[in-house]
């Protein structure tokens, strides 16, 4: 690094000993639009206020869902979250009476879901019993009765079925390739 006697103060002020330029740190400043009118400012403040309310409602709903799931069980998470989200959308402020009403609505929703699941299970069992009796009379074979899959797990069942079919196809391909290799060896 050459030393210049003329204006040497400038040279050493702008560069470090290692020859790296020094850049002063600037504090981040709030950017203000040049032409912010009163109407625009009101619109922006209204948007900020709505976003703050939305965040508060989201936090409140997550807290209520956690509390109710802890009380009624994690298996009822979807029912509880749907009831809480619908309840909070309709209300601007909540008090103790509203929380009691939310608790009652949640219990009713869980009971109706459980009753609906039981009735579907019973209907499916009745259908399968009728079918299995006719099959038993026709085929004289004993079939194992499996309960229907829980709701929402149809895709998992389809995926496992496809993976099993894929594995069986791979095994068939491996067997075919082994047979071809043995035939080739025997022909030599």
Image (tube, rainbow, N blue to C red):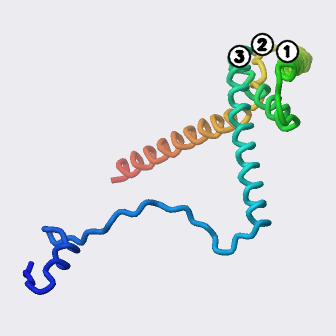
Name the residue: 68% across, 24% down.
66
Disc 3 vs disc 2: which is toward the camera?
Answer: 3
Mark 2: give few (<14), some (14-19) or many (20+) Cα within 10 Å.
few
Contact? badges 1 and 2 (CB < 8 Å)? yes
Whether 4 is drawn above or below 89: the answer is: below
Q: Name the residue under label 1.
A: 136
Residue at position x 14%, y 68% from top?
18
- Give the mark nearer the N terminus: 1 vs 3: 3
Q: Where is residue 107 in the image (x, y as percent from the top left)?
A: 84, 17
Residue 138 occupies quadrant: top right
Label 3–label 2 contact, CB within 8 A: no
Q: Which of 96 and 178 is in front in this view?
A: 96
- Residue in the image at 69% along x and 42% along y: 55
Q: What residue occupies the far bottom of the structure in this picture?
A: 6
Residue under label 3, please give it.
73
- Can residue 97 be seen in the rendering of this structure? yes
Q: In which quarter of the image is residue 97?
A: top right
Residue 71: numbered disc: none
Few, some or many C-alpha atoms within 10 Å of disc 3 (few <14, some 14-19, many ≥20)? few
Residue 115's place in the image compared with 32, above or below, is above
**143 is higher (above) or lower (below) than 183:** above
Nearer to us in this view, 31 or 65: 31
Mark before the other along the chain sequence, 3 or 2? 3
Between 7 and 122, the one lying in front of the other is: 7
Residue in view at x 70 percent, y 70 percent = 36
Q: Give the CA separation, mark 1 to mark 3.
A: 40 Å
Q: Counting other residues with Cα less than 10 Å from the Cα at mark 1, is it few (<14), some (14-19), or many (20 or more)?
A: few
Which residue is denoted by mark 2 in the rendering?
Answer: 142
Where's residue 122, x and y in %?
A: 88, 15
- From the viewer's perspective, is 44 left or right of 110? left
Quadrant for residue 59, please give it: top right
Spot occupied by residue 110 in the image (x, y as percentages of width and height): 83, 19
């Amino acid at each position: 690094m050459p030393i210049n006697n003329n204006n040497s103060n400038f040279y050493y002020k702008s560069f470090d000993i290692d020859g790296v330029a020094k850049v002063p740190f600037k504090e981040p400043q709030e950017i203000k639009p040049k032409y912010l009118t009163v109407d625009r400012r009101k619109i922006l403040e209204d948007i900020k206020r709505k976003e703050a309310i939305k965040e508060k409602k989201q936090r409140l709903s997550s807290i209520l869902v956690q509390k109710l799931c802890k009380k009624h069980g994690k298996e009822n998470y979807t029912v509880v979250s749907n009831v809480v989200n619908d309840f909070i959308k309709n209300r601007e402020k909540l008090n103790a009476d509203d929380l009691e009403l939310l608790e009652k609505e949640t219990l009713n929703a869980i009971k109706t879901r459980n009753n609906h699941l039981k009735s579907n299970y019973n209907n499916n069992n009745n259908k399968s019993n009728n079918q299995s009796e006719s099959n038993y009379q026709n085929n004289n074979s004993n079939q194992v009765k499996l309960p229907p899959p829980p709701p929402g797990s149809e895709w998992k069942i389809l995926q496992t079925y496809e993976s099993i079919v894929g594995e069986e196809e791979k095994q068939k391909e491996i067997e075919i390739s082994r047979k071809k290799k043995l035939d080739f060896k025997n022909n030599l």
